[in-house]
Amino acid sequence: MDYGTVWMRRDYWESLCYRWATEPWWERSQAAKCNRAAHLEKNHHEVERAPTFHELFDRTHKRKGSDDYVSESARTII
């Protein structure tokens, strides 16, 4: 907890540290780790390379199953 980030408020960092120290979080983390190791083929980008900015922006700012952006500001940025 003493090695917080410079870009995150101290109280947010501390609340994350407390959450990460709980048993339920640790169990889910270990299960996810095992799943990632068991299904290596699922851990690659769809195009087998790092996405471009435009691809990433579209993926995170478009409504699922449509070509519509989630907001007017997202449409303006592109």
Image (cartoon, grey):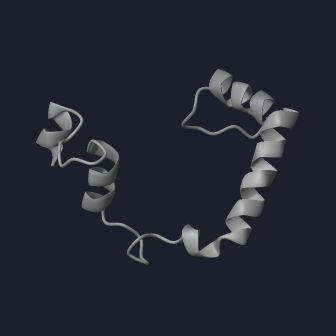
Q: Position of residue 67 (x, y in %)?
A: 18, 49
Q: Is residue 44 visible?
A: yes
Q: Quadrant of residue 12?
A: top right
In the image, taking residue 75 as reference, residue 58 lies left or right, namely: right
Residue at left offset 31%, top offset 45%: 64
Residue at left offset 24%, top offset 36%: 70
Q: Position of residue 6 (x, y in %)?
A: 59, 38
- For the residue pair 40 and 56, the one nearer the viewer reads as 40
Q: Residue furthest left?
A: 76
Q: Residue furthest right?
A: 23
Residue at left offset 78%, top offset 53%: 31
Residue 50 higher or lower than 4, as above or below? below
Q: Position of residue 1 (x, y in %)?
A: 79, 35
In the image, taking residue 31 as reference, residue 36 lies left or right, namely: left
Q: Position of residue 76 (x, y in %)?
A: 12, 40
Q: Quadrant of residue 61?
A: top left
Residue at left offset 17%, top offset 34%: 73
Q: Residue furthest front?
A: 65
Residue 5 higher or lower than 50, as above or below? above
- For the residue pair 18 and 7, the one nearer the viewer reads as 18
Q: Is residue 21 visible?
A: no
